[in-house]
Image: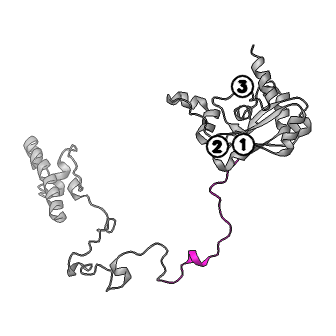
Amino acid sequence: MLRKRLSSIISSSIKSPFLQFQLNYPNKLNSINGSTSTFALVNAVDHNVRGFSLLALNDLSDNKGSRKQKTRKGRGIGSGKGKTAGRGHKGQHARGHCKLGFEGGQTPLRRRVPKRGFTNPFSLDFQPVGLGKIAMLINAGKIDSSELITMKTLKDSSAVGKQIGDGVRLMGRGSEKIIWPIHLEVSRVTARAKAAVEAAGGSVRRVHYNQLGLRALLKPEWFEKKGRLLPKPARPPPKIKDKVDSIGRLPAPRKPIPFTVEEKETESVSPA
């Protein structure tokens, strides 16, 4: 096909300019030394002969082997993948797929390997912060010691990182630097840190926040952006009732809750 097309293109490209030349210059045709050669005629034609390309859109195709035909299974014996479709005769692999990790009935690897330890799904992750760091931030003016220091205050002053987890644990590192009364509300507190704060005339309260309540404490602007109200404070589960002193308040409180009856009386008298 290509040979026939090639010959037709060459003949038409030579013949049509020759006819045009014969019509335009009949006198010049006789002065070509009597030669009837095709090449002589072509050389005598004007240089404005239009060229022709040997390629066309209907002749374009991919290279051989660049496209692989999809295997069609179960389409007759002549296809090579008929009848059993490459699965062979009978057996487990001829009937379907087996469970992941199945090893033919023997004890699988996941049961042969011994187990070491476990991950407690009920464990809580608290971010620690020392009293020495809090005292340093108070001296730097980043924390106001006259107001209640909450977990939001610690986060805003960069005393703890952004990933607080389930709350903040107050540690006793640098407790000798606390020489003035401060009031704190955290998730957990060590005995050494509590004794140091109370010795300086302050107080530490362990408050409970669930995940949603902790988000409302640390990022109240998120609820405002979404057009949602702040959630109600959640009660602690029965298992950790003895580990907390009260329910966490929302939004972030400014004054501490009094512990003793005398403090309550003082709190009630002070506004008047």
Residue 231 lies in the magenta-colored region: no
Q: Amino acid at mark 3?
A: Arg
Q: Earlier in the sequence, mark 1 or mark 3?
A: 1
Q: Is residue 170 above or below residue 3?
A: above
Q: Residue 238 or 58: which is nearer the viewer?
A: 238
Q: CA distance from mark 3 to mark 2?
A: 22 Å
Q: Quadrant of residue 86?
A: bottom left
Q: Determine which residue is flagged by label 1.
A: 244
Q: Quadrant of residue 99?
A: bottom left
**What's the residue at 20%, 46% (across, down)?**
50
Q: Secondary structure at mark 2?
A: loop
Find residue 161 and report its horizontal and vertical position in percent: 71, 40
Disc 2 residue crowd, few under 14, some 14–19, many 20+, Cα 10 Å: some
Q: Amino acid at mark 2?
A: Pro
Q: Determine which residue is flagged by label 3.
A: 254
Q: Which residues are magenta?
A: 105-126
Q: What colour-coding does the image apply? A: one colour
Is label 1 in contact with label 2 (beta carbons under 8 Å)?
yes
